[in-house]
Image (cartoon, grey):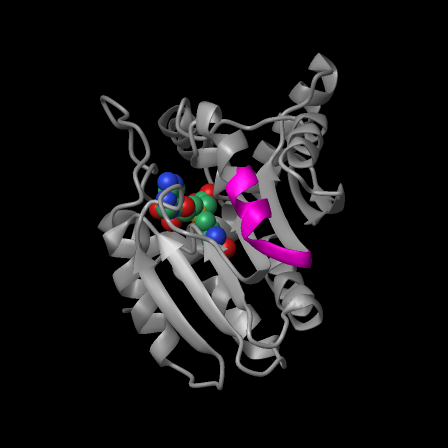
Amino acid sequence: MQSGKDSLYASPLGEISAFKFDETVVKVFPDMIQRSVPGYSTIISAIGLLAERFAKQNSVCYDLGCSLGAATLAMRQQIKAKNCRIVAVDCSMAMVEQCRQNLLISSDEVEVEVLCADIRDIAISNASVVVLNFTLQFIPLADRAAFLTTICRGLLPGGILILSEKLAFDDARQQVLQTDMHHLFKKAQGYSELEISQKRSALENVLIPETFAGHQQRLKAAGFSSAEVWFQYFNFASMIALK
Ligand code: GEK
């Protein structure tokens, strides 16, 4: 499938319905995420490098909320460990179908399984790497702690969770500044004021960001020994949590 330019919110919409990862989004997703998430490509490349370092022989790497498989592809390219496989999971059938297509384009030694499932329902075990690249923010707040505990239990000693999220800020001025800078980033990427504001309405109550301090505290409570930011570009950050 040819991936198109994201103009889903370019015309005035009478009623803006809650954002869904459906076929219309799948068609423009690479363009959408690239122009909406500052630093997205840098994070994807780094996920490959982190997987190269942390993937262990005979273990499993998970890409949870894999969308079209960008992080899976980066990991598949870099992993050197023998008999290591990747499990990529997304609950949007439209995403999963296209992800499977994208994975056909090159064949490597690392076996990949793409599952259509809710990431809260899958068993996680024998994991050396778990990736949550801008996915946790879509999980209901009340489910996040238990889900992260399941991930930590499924990780081998010395395993890594790569957690990328849109962040919120306790300080009101920081919150306004970082939000404004993200909007300026989107404008510089060619999105109009109307597109930015309609997309923001569609994501309200769907994407719930939290502060770094909140993430760090909960990761430690879930069993991780440390959690730090390795990359941040305005209100988008990627964290490394070590078991
Ligand atoms: C990337 N990681 O390109 N179970 C499974 N999947 C889910 C769930 C859930 N409960 N909730 C949301 N998703 C990707 C980008 S996008 C981020 C991730 C974004 C899936 C949802 O279907 C979507 O594909 C993905 O999480 C979030 O590196 O669009 O901002």
Give residue 107's quadrant in the image.
bottom left
Residue drawn at 25 percent across, 46 percent down: 22
Give residue 199's quadrant in the image.
top left
Give residue 89's quadrant in the image.
bottom left
Q: In the shown orientation, is residue 62 left or right of residue 116?
A: right
Q: Nearer the viewer, residue 37 or 154?
A: 154
Q: Is residue 5 visible?
A: no
Q: Position of residue 18 (x, y in %)?
A: 30, 28
Number of numbered discs on residues: 0
Residue drawn at 48 percent across, 58 percent down: 63
Q: Which residues are magenta?
A: 148-158
Q: In the shown orientation, is residue 128 left or right of residue 73?
A: right
Quadrant of the rendering where the N terminus is positioned:
bottom left
Principal SS element in the magenta part?
helix
Residue at the top extreme? 172
Q: Nearer the viewer, residue 222 or 234?
A: 222
Q: Nearer the viewer, residue 230 or 177?
A: 230
Q: Is residue 1 visible?
A: yes
